[in-house]
Image (cartoon, rainbow, N blue to C red):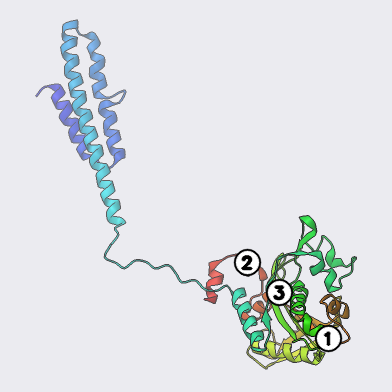
Amino acid sequence: MNELDQLVAAAQADFAAAATPAQLENAKARYLGKAGRITEHLKALAALSPEDKKAQGAAVNAAKQRIEAALTARRQQLAEAELQAQLEAEALDVTLPGRRRGMGGLHPVTRTMERIEQIFGSMGFDVADGPEIEADWFNFTALNTPEDHPARSMHDTFYVEGGHLLRTHTSPMQIRYAVQHVKKHRAVLDAGGSMPDIRVIAPGRTYRVDSDATHSPMFHQVEGLWVGENVSFKDLKSVYVSFLREFFETDDMRIRFRPSYFPFTEPSAEIDMMFNTGPLKGRWLEVSGSGQVHPQVIRNMGLDPERYIGFAFGSGIDRLAMLRYGVNDLRLFFDGDLRFLSQFK
């Protein structure tokens, strides 16, 4: 075995002993690098005669090709070994049953809204829905809100093109629903007959320029309306007290109607509640605004306020959800954090 054959055998042995790609590259440098042994043989050709240079050069190139072939083969072996190890580590047992997707659930605000609809539905109230981009007439003017009322300010209301706005409450549905109801029974009214009572709630999204732990630019509200010939403030108290007791599933609470002011009701009252037990014991909590529908609003519905009377209320659905589920930050409902939402499945 000549010197070049020994060199090839040594390279093959070193390559075979390399256990990692890094070790293999180090071995390659010893033979094929700039200062490698094959390079030394190529440099030595310069001192040979033309005839010897040709013969020796061919032998050195043949040895180099054999070393490169051994290097390529070892690289392939190491790559296959690495792939096999990865496959074994990440093995997929196809005989196992597939992983099912986790079951979703209703959002707590949606749960609350459905509960409200069910409770008032049991009292004979219809459920109405309307546009979230609303005309000024329905959102403010028809509800007896004066031109200089602070609620109309850009600081509170999102205005859009065409004189419209994002509704600041679901109260516009009072007018929309009542007008349609009156149209349906206009012939009876014109003949002096009695129109069936208007009894409706309107849950939905509303918008105001406000954002903190207890307020959101988008929030949910439910508006309630009952108009008839013999509807009194007593009916308002009876209906809303019954609703709160049913919603929170307890009679262990105190409820008060506190005088207030709203342009669309007269007289008006804030509705507060206080639990007698639990973590909120002893704290008065505002849950709704309410009152007897203002005569001008009755007129805007197309009815005679001397004959028809009624009450309205507006409650924050998100606030009711916070109280029912013990949530202290409104923003948690809208952050989309599944760790929070999955608790309500």
Amino acid tagged 2: Phe
The residue sitting at 52% across, 72% down in the picture is 342
- Tell me whether circle 2 and circle 3 mark residues in contact (CB < 8 Å): no
- Tell me whether circle 1 and circle 2 mark residues in contact (CB < 8 Å): no
Residue, disc 3: 221
Q: CA distance from mark 1 to mark 2?
A: 41 Å
128 vs 269, left or right, is: left
**274 or 129, nearer to the observer:** 129
Residue, disc 2: 334
Amino acid tagged 3: Gln
**90 or 288, nearer to the observer:** 288
Q: Position of residue 157 (x, y in %)?
A: 79, 63
Q: Position of residue 227 (x, y in %)?
A: 78, 85
- Looking at the image, is mark 1 or mark 2 earlier in the sequence? 1
Which residue sits furthest left? 1
| In the rendered image, the vertical position of residue 335 relative to residue 198, given as above or below | above
Tell me the tag on residue 308: 1
24 vs 167, left or right, is: left
Check the picture and name the quadrant holding the N terminus. Answer: top left
Say which element carries label 3.
Answer: strand
